[in-house]
Image (cartoon, helix red, strand yellow):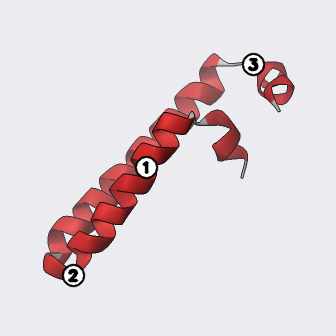
Amino acid sequence: MRVRGLLTDTMLTRLRRESRDARKNRYSARRCALSTKSVINQTISIIFFTLQAKKPRKLIASHR
């Protein structure tokens, strides 16, 4: 749940849309859906870690 505080609303909507598309694609082409899913997970982790590195923890706590 801490990730939600770091991500912006636009990012969240984009991620939701991508996950929805991935869910649709899973039934049509499994191999594609798996690769996109892993890419999405990688981007999420990269965004999360870059934000963690850039912002000090005090800033994150104050945003809540």
Q: Circle 3 — which element?
A: loop
Q: Nearer the viewer, residue 41 or 26?
A: 26
Q: Which mark is residue 15?
A: 1
6, above or below 1, in the image: above
Residue 2 placement, left or right of 45: right
Q: Which of 64/59 is in front?
A: 64
Place of residue 41 in the rendered image (x, y in percent of width and height, measured from the top left): 42, 53
- Please report the residue visible at 36 percent of the width from the left and 64 percent of the height from the top: 20
Location of the C terminus (image quadrant)? top right
Work out whether mark 1 precedes mark 2 in sequence or the reverse, and give the earlier one. 1
Q: Disc 1 to disc 2, how far (Cα)?
A: 19 Å
Density class for disc 3 (Cα within 10 Å; few <14, some 14-19, many ≥20) is few
Q: Which mark is residue 38?
A: none
Q: Which residue is mark 3?
A: 56
45 or 15, nearer to the observer? 15
The residue lying at 16 percent from left, 66 percent from top is: 32
Q: CA distance from mark 3 to mark 2?
A: 42 Å
Could you tell me the amino acid type at mark 3?
Pro
Q: Residue 22: horizontal and vertical position, in percent? A: 29, 65
Q: Are marks 1 and 2 in contact (CB under 8 Å)?
A: no
- Mark 1 lies on a secondary structure that is helix
Q: Earlier in the sequence, mark 3 or mark 2?
A: 2
Tell me the residue at 36%/51% (across/down).
Answer: 40
Q: Is residue 34 left or right of residue 62?
A: left
Kindly indicate whether the residue at mark 2 contacts the one at mark 3 (C-beta within 8 angstroms): no
Dot 2 amino acid type: Tyr
- The residue singled out by tag 2 in the image is 27
